[in-house]
Image (cartoon, grey):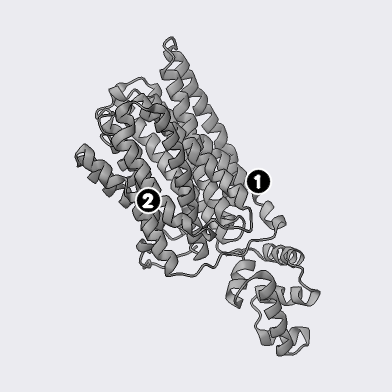
Amino acid sequence: MPVSSSPQALPIGRYVGFALLLAWHYGFWFVPGMFLFTPLLDDQVTIAWLVNLFATGFALLLLATLLGRKRHLCERRVLVRVIPPLMTLLSLLMCLYVFTFDLLAIACAIAAVLGVCEAILWILWGEFFASQRDILQISGIGTVAGLTLILVLAIAWVLPPFVKSLFVCPLSLASGIFLLQKEKRSTANFPTLLPLNIASDKLHNITIVSVISLIASLTCYYLVCIIPWETLPLTDVSFTVGIMLAASTIFITGVATYFAKSQNSVFRIYPFMLVVEIGAFALFLTGNEALLFPAFVIGLGVYALFEIMLIVYFDTLLVKGYVPPAAAFAFAGAFIRIGTALGDGLALTYERMPDISPSVVSNTSLLFVCLLAVLLIPLIRQEYKILSITNPKASKDEIEDVCNEVGNEFRLSKRELEIMILIARGYTTQNIARTLVISTHTVNTHIRHIYEKLSIHNRSELQEYLNLR
């Protein structure tokens, strides 16, 4: 999408609430001293973190499946009033009580419930953005999310242990309040979904991007967790610093994209990110302790950037009508969360095996390097499809295909289909009347019927829909 030489102001206010949800997640699990009298890297905390990741990932996929193409989670208005305060209470309970008394089973149960709650709030935010036809871009959400994470983690880092919890845990409540206020001031207007035949045509590309993102997050987090934290210069604080540096990467990428000539150029760095991750593994495999912290930070940075980029990618698909809002945001969150849990779980398994040799760890790392190198091939081949999907304008052939499929899907009459094709080509009502040798009144009647069948409100909205904008 070309931009002018003097960029427009960033819509910062739009993304603060969602950024606070991300800040709650990272602040809760990545700041030492968050759990009263319990170290951040204690086995109980690690196990609860894995349970939370799996619960969030699978809850997202389950919710997307249950909602399907027609229903929306935001229709259950009570959720936005109940879920955020529940998340705050449960996270405070974990921080101040559960881990202190060595209650692992209860901690895991609460972590699972928190994962489900996070998935619900995640989808509610996604549906809100979709209902506003809000196209998320790295320049907006990346800048705001990156800056919010830096500020929240920096403040939480320096606060006393008890105060940390009182500062971070209510962030989920603040996120919910932001969402509630925005919903009160706006009207839901969800994008009309494309016919299944058109949407399924992009399924192959969506699957490849999703699988690569899952594997990338798995390998990234395996690298982060297989590095002994005792060897890092800041020990357990390295995780906080690492996420802050990752947030800085997101922020810098957002600002750079803001001043770039093409907003969708950010998707060209997908293959580059895999190459950077391979470089991080190379640093780890040298065995030089001085290079472990750079490898650690690079792994976290690539991991965090993949999460933001996947959100932007799937949001583009939902705004254009390829996927329902719940599915778009569910995929964006689920594949990263599940990949993270698998990578962390594998590293944790190796650490708990007393007789495992260093060669096994090295060979696994080499295997991941080879896997990432192999994934570069399909990703580069799919790059042009990613760019075509995110391109703001469809080709003439694509428009013809969309119009024909829309006609079949919504049972338009032959005349309605003819008029719709002409509207997609930019014809005015008078031009359509002259071309088809009918009156303007008849044209307007057919156009009104098209709007009713497609649940579309005006000509510009119809043109955007047919042009995959």
User: Which label's residue is closer to the chain start, 1 or 2?
Assistant: 2
Q: Residue at x 46, y 43 (%)?
A: 306
Disc count in the image? 2
- Residue under pointer 1: 204
User: What residue is shown with label 2?
Assistant: 85
Query: Which residue type carries mark 1?
Result: His
Q: CA distance from mark 1 to mark 2?
A: 39 Å
Q: Is residue 253 visible?
A: no
Mark 2 Cα within 10 Å, few/some/many (few <14, many 20+)? some
Along the viewing direction, whichever of 378 and 453 lies nearer the viewer: 453
Residue 436's x, y, as percent? 77, 83
- Label 1–label 2 contact, CB within 8 A: no
Helix, strand or loop status at disc 1: helix
Mark 2 is on which residue type? Pro
Q: Position of residue 381 (x, y in %)?
A: 60, 44
- Left or right of residue 30: residue 163: left
- For the point 74% across and 90% down, the residue is 439
Query: Residue reaching furthest right?
Result: 414
